[in-house]
Amino acid sequence: MNKYIKSICLGMLICILCTMPVFAIEKDQKAILLKGVTEQTVVKPQPRGSIISTATLRITNGQDGSIGVFVQTLAHVDVDETTFGIFLDRWIDSEKRWANVEHYTFSFTKEEYPDEDLAMKSLSFKILGQPVDCHYRLRGLHAVVLDGNREMLTTETDGVLLTKE
């Protein structure tokens, strides 16, 4: 009986001594807006699903007043259709939130592009005409269709400061 009480007390003492307090940190939106960052790439694998393998989204400060965009979707198999949805957001500092300022949709089908490999489709372009000295981010929607089955994956970059130097 005495050994039993000693074992319980020793177990409780070890539990008390080996615990580490952990505190959650709230993610501040402004902390995402890093100074000096001119490019940010997000590569997101599909945790579930059988069609999409990986989605990539990149935002680049062209340092000439342009925003560079690169989007790519990789599929496990050849697909019938690949669709990209790109949403450009600007940081509104006075309201401490992101606001959507532009959106773009691109769709590629086997009928329109019979010679292209839609299982590994990528697209890059520049966005012009946005105000400089503002932070911008991209949100992407990657969708593929195979035999009538649709699978989607979303990506989101952090903010980059658009400059004109």
Image (cartoon, grey):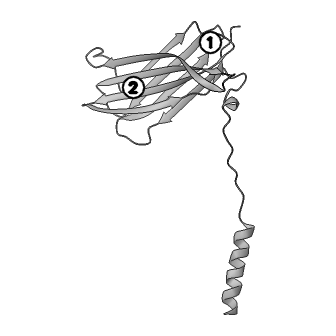
**Distance between mark 1 and mark 2 Cα atoms:** 25 Å
Say which of 92 and 134 sits in front.
Answer: 92
Mark 1 neighbour density, 10 Å: few (under 14) some (14–19) many (20 or more):
some
Residue drawn at (48%, 25%), measured in percent from left and top?
Answer: 140
Callout 2, which amino acid? Met
Callout 1, which amino acid? Gly
Q: Position of residue 124 (x, y in %)?
A: 49, 15
Residue pointed to by mark 2: 120
Horizontally, is 142 left or right of 100 in the view?
left
Residue 29's place in the image compared with 94, above or below, is below
Mark 1 secondary-structure assignment: loop
Mark before the other along the chain sequence, 1 or 2: 1
Residue pointed to by mark 1: 62
Q: Position of residue 98 (x, y in %)?
A: 60, 24
Quarter of the image holding residue 42?
Answer: top right
Farthest residue, direction bottom: 1
Residue drawn at (52%, 32%), measured in percent from left and top?
Answer: 43
Residue drawn at (69%, 44%), measured in percent from left and top?
Answer: 25
Q: Quadrant of the C terminus?
A: top right
Say which of 100 and 112 sits in front.
Answer: 100
Mark 2 neighbour density, 10 Å: few (under 14) some (14–19) many (20 or more):
some
